Amino acid sequence: MGPGEPDLGKVRFDELEVGQRSRYKLFEVTNVAMPESYDYTDVILVLTVTEETSDGFVLVESFEEGHELPEDWIWGDSDVEQEYLLRVSPGKENLEIKGKGGSIGSWIFSRYARGEDWGQLPLDPPDGPATQITGWQTDLGFCECRRTGLVSSFDLFDVTYQNLSVVMDDSATGSDGPGFTHVYSRDDGVVRSTMYHFFTSFVPPDGIGWDLLP
């Protein structure tokens, strides 16, 4: 945040407010078939709630000074801020995301912030199945489909997160597109977001992820 601007803690889906900010550390997946095959980088992404409008809250993603993406990084540019709208549905059962243009839309919400329609993630934790996070992925297993799960506990950077929803959308992988997994809760916002390919022998790394920093 700039001088004199409020810092109201991390972005919370249950109580969105201008001034909230979450920071994420980038990791790269070197072998999509191996859960432990990933490495953290020095890149840090900052997600900030900047404005409240009649359509929802405006969120901006930018890279922390001194922790930007490399200039030759193949997955995107560090000098372009991503901006999109975020709101909770009237019944408070869904988080709704809408992009405002740009090739990425959002590093954190990925496919849900693209296009002119509102993307949705369910806010209420699913009844199951129970799943665990091992390395960079869950143990739900990959499929050319969309599935959900529930993580009872996940330790990340010395913080324990509980009762996390998992939405794993690999629908596009059947046509050589990417898969996406989001791990999140109402209280903590997005804890982990990953995007990965199964047909990337010519485009290293195989995937990327963003982990919430304390």
Image (cartoon, helix red, strand yellow):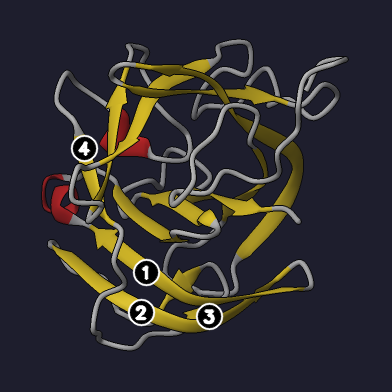
Residue in the foreground of this view, choosing between 98 and 197: 98
Q: Amino acid at mark 1?
A: Ser
Read off the residue under disc 3: 134
Left/right placement of residue 140 relative to residue 23 reads: left
Residue at (34% x, 50% y) in the render: 197
Nearest to the eye among marks 2 and 3: give it. 2
Q: Amino acid at mark 4?
A: Gly
Q: Which residue position holds label 4?
A: 119
Alpha-carbon distance for marks 1 and 3?
Answer: 15 Å
Q: Residue 144 or 114: which is nearer the viewer?
A: 114
Q: Earlier in the sequence, mark 4 or mark 1?
A: 4
Residue 78, percent from left and from top: 63, 18
Q: Residue at x 33, y 88 (%)?
A: 130
> Could you classify mark 3 by the number of other residues whose Cα lies within 10 Å: few (under 14), some (14-19), or many (20 or more)?
few
- Callout 3 amino acid: Thr
What kind of residue is marked 2? Answer: Leu
Q: Secondary structure at mark 4?
A: strand
Is 85 left, or right, of 49 in this rendering?
A: left
Mark identifier at residue 36: none
The image quadrant of residue 79 is top right
Q: Residues within 10 Å of mark 1 (few under 14, many from 20)?
A: many
Q: Secondary structure at mark 2?
A: strand
Q: Are marks 2 and 1 in contact (CB under 8 Å)?
A: yes
Q: CA distance from mark 2 to mark 3?
A: 14 Å
Q: Which residue is mark 2?
A: 150
Q: CA distance from mark 2 to mark 4?
A: 20 Å
Q: List the residue tagged with mark 1.
A: 165
Which of the 4 image quadrants contains residue 1? Answer: top right
Label 3: which secondary element: strand
Q: CA distance from mark 4 to mark 3?
A: 27 Å
